[in-house]
Amino acid sequence: MYLTENPVLQRELLVNLRMPRAFVLLLLYQLLLGVVVYFAWPQETRLDLTSNPEAARRLVDLFFLGQYLLASLMAPSFAAGAITGEKERKTYEMLLASPLQPGAIVLGKMVASLTHLAVLIFASLPIVMLCLPLGGVSVFEVLAAYMGLIISVITFGMISIACSSYFKRTAAALVVSYLLILPMVLVGILFWTQAEAVGGGAFRLLITVTVLPAVAAAICIALFVNTSARLLHPPDVGSDAQEVIDLEEEAQSAVGLVIQPNQFPDSLFAPAKRNDLIQDGANPVYDKEMRSEIFSQGTLMLRLVIQVSMLLALPLMASCLYIRPEFVAWYVGYVVVFNMLVGPVFSSGSVTSERERQTLDLLLTTTISPWEILWGKLLAGLRVSSMLTLFLLVPVGLAWVLVSPYWSNSLSVLAFLSIILITCLTTAMIGLFCSVCFRKSSVSLIATYLVIITLFCAPVAISLFAETFYAGDPVVEQIKYLGVVSPFSAAFSVPLNVELTGNDPAAPNAPPPVTWLFYGIFMLSVATLNGLLLAGMTWLFNVRWRVAGDQQS
């Protein structure tokens, strides 16, 4: 019943593995890994295989870390919609009423979600086998690395399944899953890179085959039992399999943060529902999006996002803003990552949700112009994501006032703030553009994440790759300019004077002008990108508005 005769598992496997995107994803995954290995292959004419070649070990480590990062980022996208998908398709009640045991449902969903990812992982074995003859890494280390990779993916998948059982929408489950998984991913990368320096490859092998399975088993068993119990005793379900959420009861039973829509600053991003008529001249789309959509699913997602983000920000805040202020760019990078995760959730479903509710045609045939619809939905999503992001900027303002080295770098602090603000606008704009282009919210959300990662993270990764394997090549300096739309590159290019970076008398008092030039190019490039996105989505919306109007007439 759990594996051999599990109809949930059989149905999910048939649907997922037979879709064309499964083969396209496998091709792209293999091509990406193959291209990385090709360009990272040692450039020496003759390789010394008698000793411990550093180039070969660096290549294998890069291969596993890259695969670990890709698999970890893809695991929530496969598993976070396992149960929320049933709720969105209005089949959740039927699933609960079936004779299947809750444990069989959870296990079937998890195995089916991660099977395709397992195919991708095992398909990379021929590529890593090409690296083994270079030496530097034993076969046992390779097997242990794959074992750790598979265990990590299973753990991340179970976390995503558990999040999927608590939320109604895939977007909410996905962003909470990423917030919980990303710190674990960073810890795994830090362990893999530092364990060899501490105790060598044997120590890393021992931890991977002993400690990691025990910790992962404890997490998976606890989440499996909790998720199964939630399916066995689900919350109150109303019409169309909608969970009945009482905001007052939720606020009384909430642990930790409690959101009050009638109080400041909660009213900034989650205003109370309207009890009177809309004022003349107000945008009804904006008012509806702000007052109906945010609290319609309860406050659990917002509370988790705020609490987890602040908990992760505390150590970074202390170390990067107060103890070592020269590392302020790292804290800015953390805030950017947070906005990359949260911003698309509130924008990528703005138009696709109208299609899914079959209300888009009605909206297009009203007297509201397409421009009013677009800016109403854009500001609604931007207001929520930017307010959540600005909560993490309060420590930057306090550090600006309390820490004296920042006083002489006020221009740099303002540059950091401008980078974060324009990033908030860009993520919201990309999400709304993808929502106009696609028909399903889940597809729009994944496409938004892919575009943002490509624009923000890919240039940084290419630059680090070039510096590691092509150090000294003049092309490396030119590659850095690929990140003209990456807020990470812009944040680390903002100059800080010698009083902030240290007391080295040999350090120059004035930063090189090329850093401010890069910051200016970034702001200009991102502003141009946002203008193009706005023009493109307005044109698409106008075309569809005219077509719908002609059909209506």
Image (cartoon, rainbow, N blue to C red):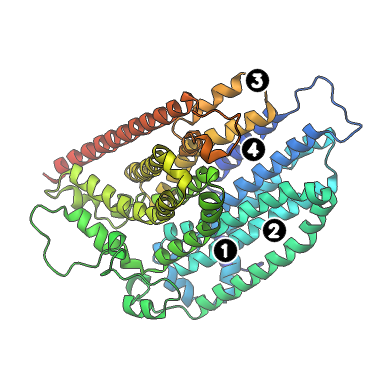
Q: Is residue 14 visible in the rendered structure shown here?
A: no
Q: Quadrant of residue 6?
A: bottom right
- Nearest to viewer (mark 4 / mark 1): 1
Q: Position of residue 124 (x, y in %)?
A: 70, 42
Q: Quadrant of residue 359?
A: bottom left
Q: Secondary structure at mark 2?
A: helix
**Between residues 45 and 508, which one lies in front from this camera angle?**
508
What element does badge 4 sit on? helix
Looking at numbered disc 2 in the image, what kind of residue is underneath it?
A: Ile
3D distance between C-alphas at marks 4 and 1: 26 Å
Which of the two marks, 4 or 3, is nearer to us in this view?
Answer: 3
Dot 1 falls on a residue whose secondary structure is helix
Q: Give the Cα separation between the discs numbered 4 and 2.
A: 21 Å
Three-letter code, disc 4: Gln
Q: Which residue is mark 3?
A: 473
Give the mark nearest the N terminus, 4 or 2. 4
Q: Is residue 167 left or right of residue 314?
A: left
Which residue does the numbered mark 1 point to in the structure image? 159
Residue 151's disc is: 2
Q: On screen, 522 above or below 66? A: above
Mark 3 Cα-neighbour bin, 10 Å: few <14, some 14–19, many ≥20? few
Question: In front here: 543 or 304?
Answer: 304
Q: In terms of sequence position, does the residue under pointer 1 or pointer 3 come before the other?
A: 1
* Mark 2 or mark 1, earlier in chain: 2
Give the label on residue 30, or none: 4
Depth-wise, is mark 3 or mark 2 nearer the camera?
Answer: 3
Residue sitting at 82 percent across and 37 percent down?
132
Give me the C-alpha separation between circle 3 and circle 2.
Answer: 39 Å
